[in-house]
Amino acid sequence: MQIHRFPLSRSIAVLLTAALAAAASLAVAQSRTDIHRDAATRNVGNDPFMMQYARAFYCNLADDNNRIVIESRGWNNTTGTGPNAEYRIPATQIFDDVWFVGNHYVGQYLIKTADGLVQVDAGNTANEVATFNFPAMQALGLSPTYPLRAVLLTHGHRDHDGGAAWLRTNLGAEIFLGSADASNKPYAPTGIDSTDLSMRQMSIGGKNFWILPTPGHTAGSTSSVVEVMDHGKPVRVLTNGGQSMSSNSIPAVASYLDSIERTYAMVKALNVEGVMTPHIYWDGEGEKMREILAKGRTVPSQHVYGHESVVRQMVIARECSAAWLSRLDATTVLPVWRYNTLEFQHASPLPTRFSVKASNGWGPLAHQAVTFEHEASGASCVATTDASGVATCASGFGPFRPGIDKVNVRFAGASTNDFVDLPATASAVVGNGCSDLAAARSAIGAREGQPRYVARLDADGNGVIDVRDVASMSRLMASGTRCN
Ligand SMILES: [Zn+2]
């Protein structure tokens, strides 16, 4: 007899996984490791790309899935020849003033400044930078008056600093490296004080970098943010220095966790929107690079992930490091970080009605204060979320002008022993409700999970957009509003 095997459909597989997880949690209490791994997943939201890359790679150890990192080391082609030559990436423009050169395992970023080049990281070997980076620099105008001013090393491992001595000797570049990684290096690095954990601005090769020492992967790992230009628009991008955690050192993993929390704060404070990762397989930039090579750079660049996406990555990384730390050290008990979102609800903001839903990967965020603010005047209104996470200001605030006035809403964050609920914001221009009303009308019958279903239009939250949602929306709209 022949047995036919059919792959489980994705949704059935997801349901089964959820059911098994629920059964397991009934049988035995979840370990701290499992709680944080689960939190990393919940913080992804509904982004398959982030699930496949940042979630999988930051959690590689806690998931017992380190093979994905080991496998990627096979892509570290430094010569352009041999069986894995296809992993080599030619110098490729990713921003107006930034080029990537390297391979699918590890690469470098060449930044053009007014008075010379700056490179982030230095390749695996002298031969590699002489063969690939040097010609790329020449193509970008390298000359005695337009030199390679500086190299900023993310840390002192060989796959990041192997070509540093060649770049110093042959091109005269100043090499910056976290001081804790700097001993016995043959290229006389300029130390970045690894014991000073504060974020500061530093001029490197005449270019401003925000520098944040992030010990963990190595003691001298350094992360940075730099402002580059994307189709004429300034955008700030993060280089996370040293992404993988130590597999067995509790102090190193504890220090990595602390570094990730500080990197989260830096990303928030500087409104970082993009990434320039040395190991491009880690957060999916390798896939973006293939797209750039095949179809060119998009507007915005593929390396612009969006601010909320970069923030989410850091929250995922934080939960993955908490998962791994609690595996190594069973006495570790840390609260779970929850990434929160605020979403204006059905037709809001209207001239006199402001309604927002706060939620996270665990469900609605209930009983929390949110503050609505009229941007132009600073007038504000505080409301508390109900059991379904919805907070509404409907009197004494406004009226504001549709199409003109902007309303910002923010949740300041909260914490308990179990959770750190991260702050969230949202902004919208006041409307008259007509576009939401039209959208709800055209989506009648759409159920949760279907493409036409939009949660914010589902006024009663019953999982289907129906005539009652349309009716309640038109009741909320100012009387006399005429929609075309
Ligand atoms: Zn390393």
Image (spheres, rainbow, N blue to C red):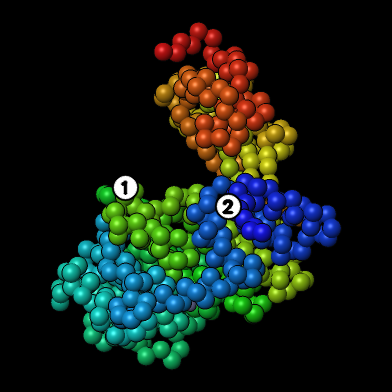
Q: Return the residue nearer the eye: 364 or 371.
A: 364
The disc labelled 1 sits on which kind of residue? Val
Q: How many marks?
A: 2
Is residue 74 shown above or below 482?
below
Q: Residue visible at 71% across and 65% down?
A: 33
Q: Residue visible at 41% across and 55% down?
A: 274
Disc 2 designates what residue? 44
Image quadrant in which you'd find residue 31: bottom right
Q: Residue visible at 79% across and 54% down?
A: 23
- Ligand 1 is within 8 Å of the C-beta of the residue at disc 2: no
x%, y% of residue 19?
A: 74, 50
Q: Is residue 22 visible?
A: yes
- Ligand 1 is within 8 Å of the C-beta of the residue at disc 1: no
Quarter of the rendering occupied by the C terminus: top left
Mark linked to residue 299: 1
Quarter of the rendering occupied by the N terminus: bottom right
Is residue 231 shown above or below 154?
above
x%, y% of residue 468?
A: 63, 18
